[in-house]
Image (cartoon, grey):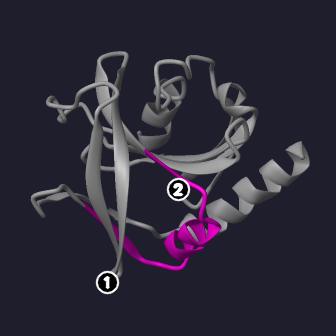
């Protein structure tokens, strides 16, 4: 069911400008490996969780940066283009970031762009990521099982593009 739902959402992306269809590159450890033509053929991993959150971690080749995106129909109060300060907790190590809100096909989401490659390595080495809003309330927690292997495949995908 998760794979079918992920395929159905494969055309969703982090901003309204990302309207091109994603290219399937396989499936590993619970993650879809994909390439996004709208991101300069940047590769990404995507999965769907039980609460129907769609999570992506990928590379924006146009901007030479990485990104982390979450979509969830339950997030009704997200404003397009608005910046939201958030905090990631990766097994006790915290990272402050700014997420940009958007809606795509009426599904609210938020994207964090980053240039620090250590952030991706930190995600790959951890078991759980918890995201908090500015008030310190937990927005979501995701199991990172299989992420390291999926990111290896995404790196291989990206290296073939360079």
Q: Position of residue 77 (x, y in %)?
A: 14, 31
Most foreground residue, 147 or 4 = 147
Write the start and end of the magenta stretch as one range.
112-131
**Could you tell whether 31 is left or right of 162 in the image?**
left
Left or right relative to 71: residue 18: right
Tell me the tag on residue 131.
none
150 w.r.t. 99: above or below: below
Helix or strand or loop: what does disc 1 sit on?
Answer: loop
Q: Which mark is residue 92?
A: 1
| Comes first in the chain, label 1 or label 2 | 2
Residue appearing at x 71%, y 54% in the figure? 154
Helix, strand or loop under label 2: loop
Q: Which residue is pictured at 27% across the width and 56% down the height?
A: 86
- Judge whether 29 appears above or below 148 on screen: above
In the picture, which quadrant includes the N terminus? top left
Task: Establish if 52 lies above or below 68.
Answer: above
Q: Residue at x 54, y 18 (%)?
A: 17
Residue 141, compared with residue 108, is above or below; it is below
Residue 132's spot in the image, x, y percent? 21, 60
CA neighbours of label 2 inside 10 A, class few (<14), some (14 to 19), many (20+): some
Q: Residue at x 26, y 45 (%)?
A: 84
Magenta stretch encompasses residue 127:
yes
Splitting the image into 4 quarters, where does residue 114 fall?
Answer: bottom right
Near-viewer residue (38 or 95): 95
Question: In the orientation shown, which residue stands out farthest toward the bottom?
Answer: 92
Q: Which residue is mark 2?
A: 30
Q: Is residue 71 magenta?
A: no
CB under 8 Å between callouts 1 and 2?
no
The percent position of residue 131, horizontal first and vertical second, equals: 27, 61
């Amino acid at each position: 069911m998760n794979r079918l739902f992920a395929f159905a959402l494969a055309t969703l992306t982090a901003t309204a400008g990302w309207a091109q269809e994603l290219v399937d590159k396989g499936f590993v450890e619970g993650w879809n490996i994909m390439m996004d033509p709208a991101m300069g053929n940047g590769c990404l991993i995507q999965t769907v969780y039980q609460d129907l959150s769609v999570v992506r971690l990928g590379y924006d080749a146009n901007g030479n940066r990485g990104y982390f995106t979450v979509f969830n129909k339950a997030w009704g109060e997200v404003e397009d283009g608005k910046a939201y300060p958030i905090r990631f907790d990766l097994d006790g190590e915290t990272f402050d970031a700014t997420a940009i809100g958007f809606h795509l096909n009426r599904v609210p989401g938020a994207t964090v762009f980053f240039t620090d490659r250590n952030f991706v390595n930190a995600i790959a080495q951890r078991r759980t990521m918890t995201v908090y809003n500015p008030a310190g309330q937990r927005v979501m927690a995701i199991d990172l099982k299989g992420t390291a292997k999926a990111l290896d495949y995404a790196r291989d995908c990206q290296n073939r593009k360079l």
